[in-house]
Image (cartoon, helix red, strand yellow):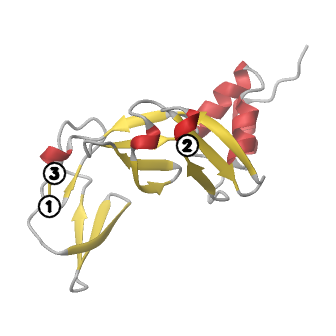
Amino acid sequence: MEPKLPQEILMEIFALLETPDLVRAGSVCCSWNSTYTSTCCFRRYKWPQTPCLIYTSESAGDNVAFIYSLEEKRAYKLTLPEPPIHRRYLIGSSNGWLVTADERSEMHLVNPITSEQISLPSVVTIEQLSFARLGDEKWTWLPPHSNFEDCIYKDGLLYAVTLLGQIITFDLSGTV
């Protein structure tokens, strides 16, 4: 009979692993895979992780990407959902998710480790400064301001900085 650790204890252990080790642990058996999935879903993994580099190669196939682990000095091959990853533009990343735009400028959030993908509302519904929540069909437009330089979302608030250095805060936790 195989000894079994409670899932809560395994999650605490898995949360301390670097991404490649976490993925390997998830492939040991069904119960560990379930714990791996829970660890990823609840974002309980160690943060910050050692950065990984992501790249594609046309010769590898349309939906293949590689992650190079700086910690292990080794590349890992990943299969990602459509549209083809090597034809997308990488716009940015946050907490392990990549923000990509396809050939029609439609944006997607992609988690290269879990192969999850979330399609963002169509870019034709964006006006100046807008936001979208999970499941939204279109972007929600924020009150008019202009000349934004940068923005960041934290704890339900969107902080936007204008070219003149003005900081504008939007509370996105309620209705706009």
Residue 26's place in the image compared with 102, above or below, is: above
Tell me the residue at 78%/52% (across/down): 72
Tell me the residue at 24%/70% (across/down): 169
Tally of marks: 3
Q: For this rendering, which residue is in front, 83 or 93? A: 83
Name the amino acid, label 3.
Ile
Q: For this rendering, which residue is in front, 101 or 62? A: 62
Say which label, 3 or 2, has the lower sequence index.
Answer: 2
Cα gap from disc 3 to disc 1, whole angstroms: 7 Å
Residue reaching furthest to the left: 144
Q: Position of residue 158 (x, y in %)?
A: 29, 63
- Secondary element under disc 1, as helix, strand or loop, is loop
83 sits to left or right of 33: left
Name the amino acid, label 2.
Ser
- Secondary element under disc 2, as helix, strand or loop, is loop
122 sits to left or right of 107: left
Asked whether disc 3 touches disc 1, contact meaning CB atoms under 8 Å apart, the reply is yes
Q: Residues within 10 Å of mark 3 (few under 14, many from 20)?
A: some
Say which label, 2 or 1, has the lower sequence index.
Answer: 2
Q: Position of residue 103 (x, y in %)?
A: 30, 42
Residue reaching furthest to the right: 1
Say the numbered circle drawn on residue 160: none
Say the numbered circle drawn on residue 57: 2
46 sits to left or right of 131: right
Q: Position of residue 162 (x, y in %)?
A: 22, 78
Q: Residues within 10 Å of mark 1 (few under 14, many from 20)?
A: few
Tell me the residue at 31%/39% (across/down): 134
Residue denoted by label 3: 126
Tell me the residue at 91%/13% (across/down): 1
Q: Residues within 10 Å of mark 2 (few under 14, many from 20)?
A: few
